[in-house]
Image (cartoon, rainbow, N blue to C red):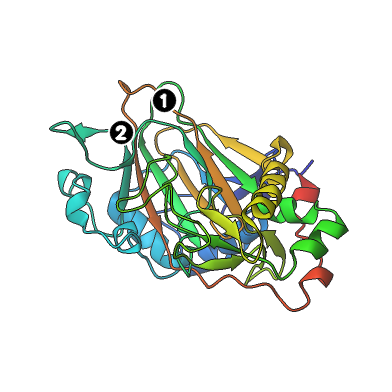
């Protein structure tokens, strides 16, 4: 087991799961550049950081996300206006913030994702450059349900057989934007479309992290996915096998939300999902993210060492 360690500015308490660490004794509104540099390194090591009892405003969240990179609004990623997400006006929020909520106004959702289950996915993998750092700030949390689960995609790759690693090396998955993670059909999309001809970016199944230099199993999202060059039957068989492997409980951390939580995860190296919760409950979280890179498989990917986090959990 990993034990808590202390730096000059905060304490790192790794979870007992395959990823994640809680960071204690820190106020995210009062961190200097040196402290953030240390936190960033800790984030790369653990893939996900949890900060409890924070008192951030939406503006504070924007300041934090800018430390990780160039903010990008989910409205721009979806090629939509903020006018379609009335929570920003309702709560007077900056455009870098997206509201994840089940609240409605005049019977219409004011934010995204509602109160239903959200299936396993990495964010914005239907883009050529999926987001890198992604974060949530918990404002209101229901008394039950709405837990978020994260899995370690380094561990999912590292524990594949050598034969499977060779099989998927050089292979890519098309990520078509047909169904969202709440399993709702995108506007203008069709379930009857041939996935082989639907537009969408292709990303390598073995993705090498641009900062850690370690490999991840890059699956993106299950629906609207196709392994290029295969028959539909072969593609489905391989994807089913990889998803069954990646979503094993041994790779997963469950986050039970509390108001004031800030959770920051590496969207490049994780997948996540959410439980449903009662529609009569209120759940409000603020989300922000930064631009990522175009995923790639290193030429020497099969010779690279494993990421250490799973082995130390």
Quadrant for the C terminus in the image: top right
Residue 240 is situated, as x and y percent measured from the top left of the image, at: 67, 45
**SS for tag 1?**
loop
- Measuring from the top left, give residue 275's x and y in whole percent: 49, 31
Q: Is residue 255 left or right of residue 55?
A: right
Residue in view at x 45 percent, y 21 percent: 144
Q: Residue furthest right?
A: 162
Give the class, few, some or many, for how many residues have Cα within 10 Å of label 1's Cα (few <14, many ≥20): many
Task: Give the number of the disc on residue 102.
Answer: 2
Q: Is disc 2 in contact with disc 1, using a CB cutoff of under 8 Å?
A: yes
Q: Could one spot residue 109 in this view of the protein?
A: yes
**Which residue occupies 56% across, 48% down?**
222
- Foreground pick, 110 / 177: 177
Give how far apart the Cα atoms at labels 2 and 1 are: 10 Å
Q: Quadrant of residue 31?
A: bottom left
Q: Residues within 10 Å of mark 2 (few under 14, many from 20)?
A: many
The answer to whether residue 296 is left or right of residue 309 is: left
Disc 1: which residue? 277
For residue 24, say whether it is visible: no
- The residue positioned 53% from the left and 48% from the top of the image is 121
Q: Is residue 56 left or right of residue 126?
A: left
As rendered, which of 109 and 53 lies closer to the eye? Answer: 109
* Placement of 189 over or under 63, stated as above or below: above
Q: Position of residue 93 (x, y in %)?
A: 22, 52
**Image quadrant containing the N terminus:** top right
Whole-percent x and y of residue 130? 48, 64
Q: What residue occupies the far left of the structure in this picture?
A: 106
The answer to whether residue 1 is above or below residue 42 is above
The residue at the far bottom in this view is 299
Residue at horizontal 54%, vertical 57%? 267
- Per the rendering, the mark at residue 178 is none
């Amino acid at each position: 087991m990993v034990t808590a360690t202390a730096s000059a500015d905060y304490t790192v308490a790794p979870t007992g799961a395959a990823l994640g660490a809680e960071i204690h004794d820190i106020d995210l509104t009062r961190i200097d550049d040196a402290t953030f540099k240390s936190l960033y390194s800790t984030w790369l090591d653990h893939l996900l950081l949890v900060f409890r009892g924070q008192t951030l405003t939406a503006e504070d969240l924007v300041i934090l996300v800018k430390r990780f990179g160039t903010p990008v609004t989910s409205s721009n990623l979806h090629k939509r206006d903020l006018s379609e997400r009335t929570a920003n006006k309702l709560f007077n929020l900056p455009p870098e913030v997206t509201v994840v909520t089940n609240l409605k106004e005049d019977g219409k959702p004011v934010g995204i994702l509602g109160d239903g289950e959200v299936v396993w996915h990495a964010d914005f993998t239907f883009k050529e450059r999926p987001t890198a750092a992604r974060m949530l700030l918990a404002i209101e949390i229901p008394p039950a349900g709405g837990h978020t689960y994260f899995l370690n995609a380094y561990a999912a790759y590292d524990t594949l057989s050598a034969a499977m690693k060779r099989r998927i090396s050089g292979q890519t998955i098309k990520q078509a934007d047909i169904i969202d993670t709440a399993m709702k059909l995108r506007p203008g999309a069709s379930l009857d479309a041939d996935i082989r001809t639907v537009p969408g970016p292709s990303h390598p199944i073995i993705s090498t992290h641009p900062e850690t230099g370690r490999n991840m199993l890059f699956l993106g999202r299950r629906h609207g996915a196709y392994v290029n060059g295969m028959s539909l039957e072969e593609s489905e068989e391989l994807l089913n096998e990889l998803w069954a492997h990646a979503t094993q409980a041994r790779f997963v951390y469950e986050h039970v939300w509390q108001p004031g939580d800030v959770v920051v995860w590496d969207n490049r190296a994780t997948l996540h999902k959410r439980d449903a919760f009662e529609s009569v409950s209120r759940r409000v979280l603020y989300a922000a993210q930064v631009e990522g890179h175009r995923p790639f498989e290193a030429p020497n990917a099969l010779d690279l060492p494993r990421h250490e986090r799973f082995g130390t959990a």
